Amino acid sequence: MEYKCFQMTATYRGFDSRHNVFYLPICTSNIVFHSAAVGIVYDKEQKMQRFYLGHDDDILSLTVHPNKDIVASGQIGKSPDIHVWEGTSMKTVSILKGGHQRGVSFLDFTADGKKLASVGLDDNHMIVVWDWRKGAQLASTRGHKDKIYMLKWNPFDGNKLVTVGNKHIKFWCQAGWSEYIL
């Protein structure tokens, strides 16, 4: 088997992924992004990159924990996984399985970092809320038939989130998944 080694990559999948470049909160000289199936942390001061190689298909979505050195990345595929990993050591913390089909288009941690929400690429754009430390689904619901372009938790209430998409904005409350449409 032939292995390819690389020191640096300069590509980015932007045609079907959005909101996927972040600074790590613990070290603002580190920029996190993805290319193909690789999670990348670029250290601006050292002018070097570190690579997370846990995915087996292209990464579509990425987010960082608000207070820690934790990154979550979602991939494309028939039964796509979400990987939660450390941005400095590049070690896998947990792998979230199930809940989505075709791909994971968006990810977001709550402001306290305890929960992670994801949106799938299936026909109903399923929204799943995870306890990422335990690798467990806490809740799920159908998002919308039309494409969803953004998912964001309310910064003051970890039980409320908003989705924005083609011709819709929806506000969600996790308790019973009440949905309010503008």
Image (cartoon, rainbow, N blue to C red):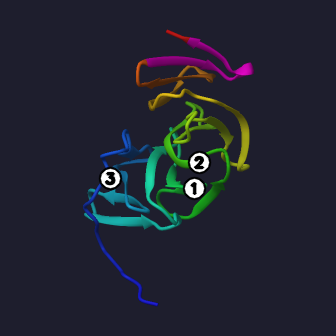
- Which span of residues is magenta-colored? 168-180
Crowding at mark 2 (Cα within 10 Å: few <14, some 14-19, many 20+): many
Q: Percent position (x, y) of residue 81?
A: 59, 55
What amino acid type is highlighted by mark number 2? Gln
Kindly indicate whether the residue at mark 2 contacts the one at mark 1 (C-beta within 8 angstroms).
Answer: yes
What amino acid type is highlighted by mark number 3? Arg
Q: Quadrant of residue 6?
A: bottom left
Residue pointed to by mark 1: 78
Crowding at mark 1 (Cα within 10 Å: few <14, some 14-19, many 20+): few
> Is residue 59 positioned above or below 2 on the image?
above
**Count of residue discs:** 3
Q: Residue at x 27, y 56 (%)?
A: 44
> Is residue 145 positioned above or below 33 on the image?
above
Q: In the rendered view, does 81 fall on the left or right side of 140?
A: left
Q: In the rendered view, does 130 fall on the left or right side of 9?
A: right
What amino acid type is highlighted by mark number 1? Lys
Q: Percent position (x, y) of residue 27?
A: 39, 49
Q: Is residue 70 visible?
A: no
Kindly indicate whether the residue at mark 3 contacts the one at mark 2 (C-beta within 8 angstroms).
Answer: no
Callout 3: SS? loop
Q: Earlier in the sequence, mark 2 or mark 3?
A: 3
Residue pointed to by mark 2: 101
Q: Percent position (x, y) of residue 110?
A: 58, 32
- Residue 172 magenta: yes
Principal secondary structure, stretch drawn in magenta: strand
Q: Nearer the viewer, mark 2 or mark 3?
A: 2
Q: Residue at x 49, y 9 (%)?
A: 182
Q: Nearer the viewer, residue 82 or 27?
A: 82
Residue pointed to by mark 3: 13
Q: Is residue 74 visible?
A: yes
Q: Residue at x 30, y 46 (%)?
A: 15
